Amino acid sequence: MTPADVVGVVVGAVVVVLTVLSAIATVVVPRGEPVRLTNAVFRVSRKLFELRSDVLRHDYERRDRAMSKFAPVTLIGLAFVWLTAVLLGFTGIFHGFADGVGWAYAFEASGSSLMTLGFVAVDGVDLHIVAFAEAGLGLLLLALLITYLPTMYAAFSRREALVTRTSISAGTPPTPWALIERYHRIAGFDRLEAQLWTPWTGGFVDIEESHTSLSALALFRSPQPHRSWITAAGCILDTAALLQSSVEGYDDSRAQLTMRAGFLSLRAIADHHGVAHDPDPSPDDPISITRDEWEQVLDDLAAIGVPIVADRDEAWRAFRGWRVNYDAVLLGLAEFTMAPYAPWSADRSPPIRLPRSA
């Protein structure tokens, strides 16, 4: 074996090991750790999809349909990248161990072993060991992907059930004032604990776990084009903040726990995807909601009989103190996921501003 062959074997082995570790970290490791190869594939794929979506910028329905394919196509592309990297890595290994053969033979032998086709014969115990190892790794990667997809879609289904339930009371796009109005007129605020706070507290825990360990989930779009997990989450958090700060006599510790579960979940997902935000904001930090916007919502709610607190200055300080915990991270994730229009979230996350749905 010449020095060049040794280098080829070493480089090939490093490529194979790093690829397999990348696949294991992406699919098996429960801790949501950033994986360079996976992140690079998603970045490249996103750029390609954004090139097409820019052409459709003024047609949101078509743009959403185009972006809805982004995460699924990228997942399949990721499996292709894993297999290609293993193929090329073992090509270097075959070339180093098989004396006097060219790169074409090494490539064919690697492909034959990876796909378990066996159309290229190899001689010698060392080459048989290499072929067996590559065939086993190829099957392992495919098995990981096959088990990965059902787990991901189960988590996706749980998330979308929450989003759909929220749209029933909050509308599409969801707004906290619509949700408060419906519960005031139909169900009563006493039912919020069972129908909203408890499901969403558990939902935020589930979303944090699934969207960091299965990171592609954050980019899976809802089946309905004007729904989104991030705008639904923002609506729930704003509803709790409005009720706690601005509605006379409303003080529910379960709503506060839902808000805490929500902003901790969004921060964890933002950290995993590298979305910038202040991890410890001050209650006096500015927020994206203006006081005039907030006042208008309170006036509209008062007009339908919702009891609004008399001291609006204190209520505004309380609302700001709650909203600041999730304001930046909510807008950042709305931009990152290219969320559809929704007031107080995707409508103010630059540089993407989408037209309001009918």
Image: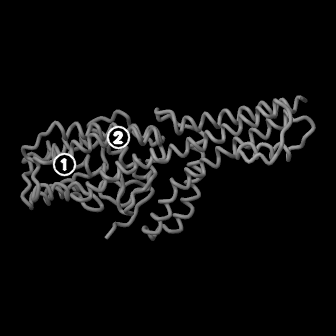
- Report whether 178 appears left or right of 209: left
As helix, strand or loop, the secondary structure at mark 2 comes to helix
The disc labelled 1 sits on which kind of residue? Gln
**Rendered location of residue 189, percent (x, y):** 11, 49
The disc at residue 195 is: 1
Residue at x-position 74% and y-position 39%: 89
Viewer-nearest residue: 132 or 237: 132
- Report whether 129 appears left or right of 270: right
- Report whether 294 appears left or right of 345: left
What kind of colouring is applied to the model shown? one colour
Residue at which label 2 appears: 206
**Rendered location of residue 181, percent (x, y):** 14, 58
The disc labelled 2 sits on which kind of residue? Asp
Residue at x-position 54% and y-position 59%: 50
As helix, strand or loop, the secondary structure at mark 1 comes to helix
Residue at x-position 91% and y-position 34%: 99
Quadrant that contains the C terminus: bottom left
Instruction: Find the residue positioned furthest to the right.
Output: 100
Residue at x-position 60% and y-position 44%: 142
Viewer-nearest residue: 340 or 228: 228
Viewer-nearest residue: 357 or 216: 216
Quarter location, residue 106: top right
Whether tag 2 and tag 1 are in contact, CB under 8 A, the answer is no
**Rendered location of residue 280, percent (x, y):** 34, 33
Q: Earlier in the sequence, mark 2 or mark 1?
A: 1
